[in-house]
């Protein structure tokens, strides 16, 4: 098994000290390391050249663009497996070995694991209710297991704009598979949400419940833009619609019609209430010099956000077609029970 490690960077010198320290605990597992830097000017490259030591290290430049840079680095790689090591996120050596072993054993194209969440100060955060956590819980996954592509597509569709892959820094991709299937570029920061929708029926997904990586919550450089998120969600659903049309024979006429109607329904919804509640809380939190838990307005909006999410999940705010797809998920998941 040979491993290519991709490290995308853009003015992230403050995150690299701990990143390189963790990388050094498993760097011998990597056969090549490719840094794709987007013209950093904060000392990122200088620090990398000084402290990132590997027998097969390449540093390449690429213009700014998240998934554009990822795709560029992926195309430079030659490894059987690819790990995207994003700045600030950490992977334990034992976890990486776990992913490598079970990806091989299950003949997976991607193996996904739930991350542990941390602040930039290194403080642990409660487990977030990401799609990957819900999928593992709902499917009753207690050991690495392959999940059915139709099940994964349905999950990906109803989770937009969130990705069923979780964090790519907690995952491992088969090299040839990923090099032939780049991340979509018209979905902004949600390229990893669109990827499993675009390639669901070409990809063998394996999920493991084992945790051994850390996802760092970064400070947002720009305020959350609801209009932009609406646009990205529509772009993601356009990717899904193309997949439905291309694979209608696999999906079946009835499900294809249901998925298409759901996409049309969702595209008519502007600023859904959950997204608005999240944005209102984030804006209040970011606007205050105080920690959010000392800000009465932010506390109030956080409570409203939690209530809105609860109402949405309990079905009170769910569109009927969403409930219909959710009701189908258990039967779709059982198709993959034996991998």
Image (cartoon, grey):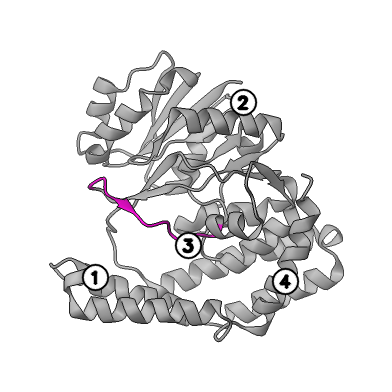
| Cβ–Cβ under 8 Å for marks 4 and 3 | no
Q: Is residue 21 above or below residue 278?
A: above
* Comes first in the chain, label 4 or label 2: 2
Taking the spot 51% from the left edge, 52% from the top edge, the residue there is 166
- What label sits on residue 80 in the rendered view? 2
User: In the shown orientation, is residue 300 left or right of residue 128?
Assistant: left
Residue that numbered label 1 is attached to: 285
Between 331 and 13, the one nearer to me in the picture: 331
Alpha-carbon span between mark 4 and mark 2: 34 Å
Residue that numbered label 4 is attached to: 259
Taking the spot 60% from the left edge, 54% from the top edge, the residue there is 136
| Cβ–Cβ under 8 Å for marks 1 and 4 | no
| Cβ–Cβ under 8 Å for marks 2 and 3 | no
Which stretch appears magenta?
Answer: 121-131
x and y percent of residue 123 in the render?
A: 27, 49
Residue that numbered label 3 is attached to: 129
Q: Is residue 126 magenta?
A: yes
Q: Nearer the viewer, mark 4 or mark 3?
A: 3
Taking the spot 46% from the left edge, 76% from the top edge, the residue there is 309
Between 132 and 140, the one nearer to me in the picture: 140
Q: Quick one: which residue is furthest to the bottom in this view? A: 316
Alpha-carbon span between mark 1 and mark 4: 36 Å
């Amino acid at each position: 098994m040979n491993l290519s490690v991709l490290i995308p960077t853009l003015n992230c010198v403050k995150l690299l000290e701990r990143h390189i320290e963790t990388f050094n605990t498993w760097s011998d597992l990597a056969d090549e390391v490719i840094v794709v830097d987007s013209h950093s000017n904060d000392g990122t490259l200088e620090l990398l050249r000084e402290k990132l030591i590997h027998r097969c290290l390449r540093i390449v430049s690429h213009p700014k663009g998240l998934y554009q840079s990822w795709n560029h680095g992926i195309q430079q790689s030659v490894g059987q497996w690819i790990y995207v090591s994003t700045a600030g996120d950490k992977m334990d050596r034992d976890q990486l070995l776990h992913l490598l072993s079970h990806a091989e054993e299950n003949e997976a194209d991607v193996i996904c694991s739930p991350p542990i969440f941390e602040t930039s100060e290194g403080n642990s955060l409660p487990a977030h209710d990401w799609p990957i956590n819900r999928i593992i819980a709902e499917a009753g996954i207690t050991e690495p297991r392959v999940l059915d592509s139709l099940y994964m597509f349905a999950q990906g569709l109803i989770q937009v704009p969130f990705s069923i892959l979780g964090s790519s820094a907690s995952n491992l991709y088969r090299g040839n598979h990923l090099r032939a299937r780049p991340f979509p570029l018209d979905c902004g920061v949600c390229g990893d949400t669109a990827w499993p929708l675009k390639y669901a029926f070409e990809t063998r997904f394996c999920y493991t419940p084992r945790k051994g990586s850390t996802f760092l919550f970064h400070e947002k450089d720009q305020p959350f833009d609801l209009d932009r998120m609406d646009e990205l969600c529509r772009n993601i659903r356009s990717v899904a619609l193309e997949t439905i049309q291309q694979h209608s024979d696999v999906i079946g006429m009835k499900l294809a019609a249901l998925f298409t109607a759901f996409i049309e329904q969702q595209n008519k919804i502007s600023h859904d209430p959950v997204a608005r509640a999240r944005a209102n809380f984030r804006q209040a939190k970011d606007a205050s010099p105080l920690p959010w838990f000392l800000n009465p307005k932010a506390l109030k909006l956080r409570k409203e956000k939690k209530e809105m999410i609860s109402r949405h999940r309990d079905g009170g705010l769910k569109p009927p077609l969403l409930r219909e797809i959710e009701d189908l998920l258990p039967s779709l998941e059982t198709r993959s029970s034996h991998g």
